[in-house]
Image (cartoon, grey):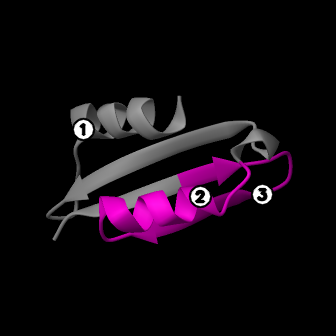
C-alpha cells in the first residue's frame, strides 16, 4: 500500500506525519503553517520502498 510521509523540521525538532492518500496529505497541509519550518520534504513509499522520483514530484507539487 502506498504511503506518503511529510517531514517537517524546525530548529529543535523533526516531525513526521504519515498519510495514506493525497487527500489526507492535502487536508494535513491545510492545517499546518509551513512558513515556520526550515526544512520540508515529502517521501513516497510503495511496498515499503522509497520511490525517489515520485517523492521529488510530490515535494515540488505540494511544498513549492
Q: Identify residue for label 3.
A: 13
Residue in the picture at 40% in, 34% down: 61
Could you tell me how far apart the alpha carbons at marks 3 and 1 are, in whole angstroms? 25 Å
Dot in front, 1 or 2: 2
Q: Magenta residues?
A: 7-33
Q: Identify residue for label 2.
A: 30
Where does the image place residue 52, in percent across and percent down from the top left? 27, 36
Query: Residue 62: which numbered mark, if any?
Result: none
The tag earlier along the polypeptide, 3 or 1, is 3
Residue in the picture at 56% in, 56% down: 29
Q: Nearer the viewer, residue 17 or 48?
A: 17
In-image side of 4 versus 39 (left or right): left
- The quarter of the picture where residue 2 lies is bottom left
Residue 60 among magenta residues: no
Q: Residues within 10 Å of mark 2 (few under 14, many from 20)?
A: few
Residue in the picture at 76% in, 40% down: 35
Could you tell me how far apart the alpha carbons at marks 2 and 3 are, in whole angstroms? 21 Å
In-image side of 2 versus 38 (left or right): left
> For the residue labelled by badge 3, is the local secondary structure a helix, a strand or a loop?
loop
Amino acid at each position: 500500500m502506498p504511503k506518503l510521509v511529510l517531514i517537517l523540521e524546525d530548529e529543535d525538532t523533526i516531525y513526521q506525519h504519515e498519510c495514506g492518500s493525497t487527500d489526507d496529505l492535502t487536508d494535513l497541509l491545510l492545517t499546518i503553517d509551513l512558513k515556520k519550518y526550515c526544512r520540508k520534504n515529502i517521501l513516497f513509499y510503495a511496498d515499503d520502498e522509497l520511490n525517489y522520483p515520485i517523492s521529488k514530484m510530490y515535494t515540488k507539487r505540494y511544498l513549492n
